[in-house]
Amino acid sequence: IIIMDCASAEMTKYASNTMLAARITLMNEIALVCQKAGADIELVRQGVGTDSRIGMSFLFPGIGYGGSCFPKDVRALIHTAKKLGVDTEIAKAVEKVNDLQKKVLIERILEHYGSAKSIKGKVFSLWGLAFKPRTDDVREAPSLIICAELLKMGASIQAFDPEAIETFKQAFGNKAGITYFNNNYESLMAADALIICTEWSEFRRPNFEKIKGLMRGNVIFDGRNLYALDQMPKSGFKYISIGRPSV
C-alpha cells in the first residue's frame, strides 16, 4: 500500500494507463512499418521483449485498444493537462494513432479487393465484437469502426461473439446489413472472407477444413495475429494479419 495525496493518486492512474496505451500504440505503429519492410512483428516483439528494460507485457500488435480505461484515462490526462496549461503531445499522439489503427484492417481489405466498389455485395464473417476476450464490453471496440466502414461500402456482415452480441447491438444500433449468429461456424456460411477482431480462445484452433467448406471465399483478415504464418499455407487460405507478411 502506497500512501499519497489525492492528486498524486489520480495522476498515478492516468499515468499508468497512458503509459500502457502508449506501449500498445507504439507496437502497433512499428507493426505498420514491419508490414511495408517485409519484417515479422512477432519476431520483433520477441526480440524487443527480451530486453530486461522493456519486458514482454503489452507488446502484442493488433487493431487498437478500446474499453473503459485506456481511452478515458488518456483523454482525461490530456484534458487535465490542458486545463493546467501543459501540452501533452505524446498522449495526444497515442490517441490519434490508436484511432487510425482501428481502420488498419479496412485498409488491408481494400488493398486485397482493389477498391471500395469491389467490396459492395461482399459478405464478411466477423469473429469477435468485444474490445478484448472474456468480457461483453464493446466500448470503443475496433469492431464498431470496422462494421460501420464495411456497411458504408455496401458489404454484409455475419457476426459472432461468445459474450458481446447484445452489448454490441445496443452500441451499434439497428443497422441493415448485419446479422448475428450464436456459433462462429454458422457465421461463415457463404462468406467471402473472415475477419477476426477479438482474440477469444475459441478462435485460436479452428477447423480450417470446416471453415473452407462453409465459406465462399478463401481469405482471412486477422486483426489479432492468432495463427502461425508457417501453418497457414497448408490451410488453403490467403492469410493477412498485422505487421507480418501475407501468406
Image (tube, grey):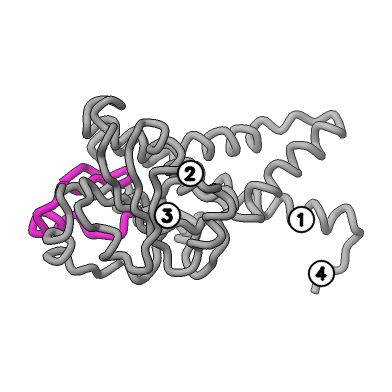
- Label 4 crowd bin: few (<14), some (14–19), many (20+), radius 10 Å: few
- Going from the N terminus, do you reach mark 4 or mark 3 first? 4
- Going from the N terminus, do you reach mark 1 or mark 3 first? 1
In the rendered structure, find residue 60 and report the number of the disc placed on it.
3
Quarter in which the N terminus is drawn? bottom right
User: Which residue is at 48% across, 68% downward?
Assistant: 163
- Label 3 crowd bin: few (<14), some (14–19), many (20+), radius 10 Å: some
Residue 50 shows in the view: no
- Label 1 crowd bin: few (<14), some (14–19), many (20+), radius 10 Å: few
Residue 19 versus residue 226 in the image, above or below: above
Q: Which residues are magenta?
A: 224-247
- Going from the N terminus, do you reach mark 2 or mark 3 first? 3
Measured Cα–Cα span from mark 1 to mark 3: 24 Å
Q: Nearer the viewer, residue 4 or 240?
A: 240
Q: Nearer the viewer, mark 2 or mark 3?
A: 2
Measured Cα–Cα span from mark 4 to mark 3: 30 Å
Mark 4, secondary structure of its residue:
loop
Residue 199 shows in the view: yes
Specify the amino acid type for callout 1. Answer: Thr
Q: Nearer the viewer, residue 76 or 36?
A: 76
